[in-house]
Image (cartoon, rainbow, N blue to C red):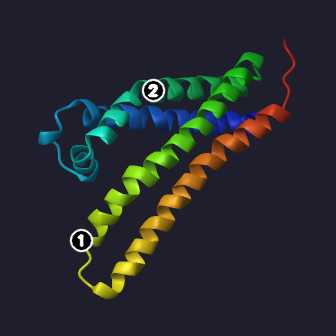
């Protein structure tokens, strides 16, 4: 079980590092010069943009700790298990906060942005439903992973060397 969780921690930690580094220009470069959906969303809501900038350092630290604890879990390190448990708890809190951000900021903006591009009035309700379902699915998936990791890590004991 430790190898599976360790591998997932390495995978998601490295994905987090790549995502954070590649998106750093989005959060810290002037938004007026940027294009794209996320840049438009950040420009449209200063509060959301400030929250995303404030979460950059904790997200970077989380990704590094998740990656390194994954390596430690593969080596069956008791210290890595403790760090991984901390990452799982942080992941649960982050998932709940992300759920709030999604419901408060992301879904309303996405709905407005998506629905104004739909030309066929019969498809508006379908697009609205699809957008809402995909948003709520992402919330559930974001909460499931750290919760499952926490439960599995609590059940798995590692003996000190």
Q: Position of residue 39 (x, y in %)?
A: 24, 46
**Disc on the earlier residue, 1 or 2:** 2
Q: According to the image, label 1 marks what residue?
A: 116
Q: Is residue 88 above or below residue 40?
A: above
Taking depth in this image into account, of 114 and 75 the one nearest to the observer is: 114
Q: How many marks?
A: 2
Determine the CA span between mark 1 and mark 2.
Answer: 35 Å
Q: Position of residue 57 (x, y in %)?
A: 42, 24
Taking depth in this image into account, of 96 and 161 the one nearest to the observer is: 96
At x 73%, y 36%, the residue is 150
Picture quarter with the N terminus:
top right
The answer, for residue 1, to whether it is visible in the render is no
The answer, for residue 11, to whether it is visible in the render is yes
Picture quarter with the C terminus:
top right
Left or right relative to 139: residue 73: right
- Choose top left, top right, bottom left or bottom right for residue 17: top left
At x 56%, y 38%, the residue is 11
- Choose top left, top right, bottom left or bottom right for residue 123: bottom left
Left or right relative to 158: residue 107: left
At x 41%, y 79%, the residue is 126
Q: Is residue 1 above or below residue 141?
A: above
Say which mark, if any, is on residue 60: 2
User: Tag 2's secondary structure?
Assistant: helix
Taking depth in this image into account, of 157 and 126 the one nearest to the observer is: 126
Q: Position of residue 35 (x, y in %)?
A: 18, 48
């Amino acid at each position: 079980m430790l190898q599976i969780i360790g591998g997932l921690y390495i995978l998601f930690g490295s994905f987090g590092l790549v995502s954070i580094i590649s998106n750093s220009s989005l959060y810290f470069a002037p938004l007026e010069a940027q294009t794209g959906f996320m840049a438009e969303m950040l420009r449209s809501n200063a509060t959301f943009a400030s929250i995303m900038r404030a979460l950059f350092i904790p997200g970077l630290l989380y990704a590094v700790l998740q990656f390194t604890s994954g390596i430690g879990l593969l080596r069956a390190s008791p210290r890595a298990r403790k760090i991984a448990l901390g990452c799982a708890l942080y992941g649960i809190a982050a998932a709940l906060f992300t759920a709030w951000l999604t419901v408060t900021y992301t879904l309303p903006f996405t709905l407005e942005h998506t629905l104004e591009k739909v030309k066929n009035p019969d498809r508006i309700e379908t697009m609205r439903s699809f957008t809402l379902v995909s948003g709520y699915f992402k919330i559930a998936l974001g909460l499931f992973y750290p919760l499952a990791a926490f439960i599995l890590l609590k059940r798995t004991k590692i003996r000190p060397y």
